[in-house]
Amino acid sequence: MKLYYAAGACSLAPHIALSEAGIAAKTIPVDLKTHKLPDGSDYYAANPKGYVPMLELDDGTKLTEVAVLLQVIADKKPGTLAPAAGSIERYKLMEWLNFIATELHKGFSPLWAPDTPDLTKERAIAGIKRRLGLIDAQLAKTPFLTGSAFTIADAYLFTIVNWTNFMSMDISEFKHVTAFMKRVAERPAVHAAMKAEGLVK
């Protein structure tokens, strides 16, 4: 199995999931500015979408999209990072994955572009914080998004909320989210994945 990633990007979520599941995978860094792989080849040739993550299975099958890759990884080790497929608990997990992908992850898009007008950035930040408010309310009830156990939804949430550090975005008002971030960062498997990407020492 191969994981194509860029340090600190949304690909950190499946990297964390692999680490949490104890699944060995070859990690291949992608230069998102040049779209080159370490061997000098064009990443677009491997993935026409051009972004990360991409997971290449042992049979050569290539898959993209964070929420999908996370479930593929979780299903390699049933019962560890996600409830059983087809269960109501799994659908609730998928609900969170979809919320993070469409409402939180994509909400950061305007903030990455240097030419985004200030008003657009302000609106994007306000939208992100509205979503964080909903998440904060959930985390006031349970240590992780779906209950007492860490799941792939938490790996995704941690990865995206971590971007607030790159943006110098103050989220201290969300006490339960900040406590969650600290709690997840202290997990050995999460630390190992972040260390492998050069994000922590």
Image (spheres, rainbow, N blue to C red):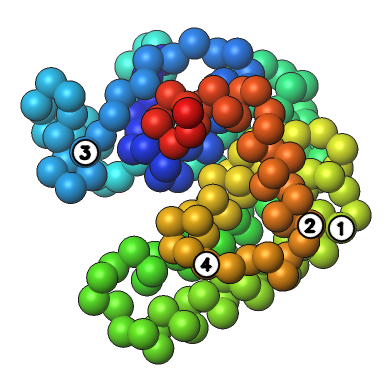
Q: Residue at x 51, y 75 (%)?
A: 125
* Cα distance in 3D space between marks 4 and 3: 25 Å
- Amino acid, disc 4: Met
Task: Answer above or below: position of 179 versus 194.
Answer: below
- Amino acid, disc 2: His
Task: Name the residue beneath numbered marker 1.
Answer: 140
- Amino acid, disc 1: Ala
If you read the primary sequence from the N terminus, does the residue marked by circle 4 or circle 3 appear first?
Answer: 3
If you read the primary sequence from the N terminus, does the residue marked by circle 3 or circle 2 appear first?
Answer: 3
- Percent across and percent down for residue 46 are 21, 31
- Percent across and percent down for residue 75 are 64, 23
Q: Residues within 10 Å of mark 4 (few under 14, many from 20)?
A: few
Task: Answer above or below: position of 8 versus 14.
Answer: below
* Cα distance in 3D space between marks 4 and 1: 21 Å
Q: Quadrant of residue 139?
A: bottom right
Left or right: residue 176 versus residue 5 is right
Give SS at disc 4: loop
Task: Name the residue beneath numbered marker 3.
Answer: 31
- Percent across and percent down for residue 178 are 70, 55
Task: Name the residue beneath numbered marker 2.
Answer: 176
Cβ–Cβ under 8 Å for marks 3 and 2: no
Residue 89 visible? The answer is yes
Give SS at disc 3: loop
Q: Residue at x 33, y 38 (%)?
A: 6
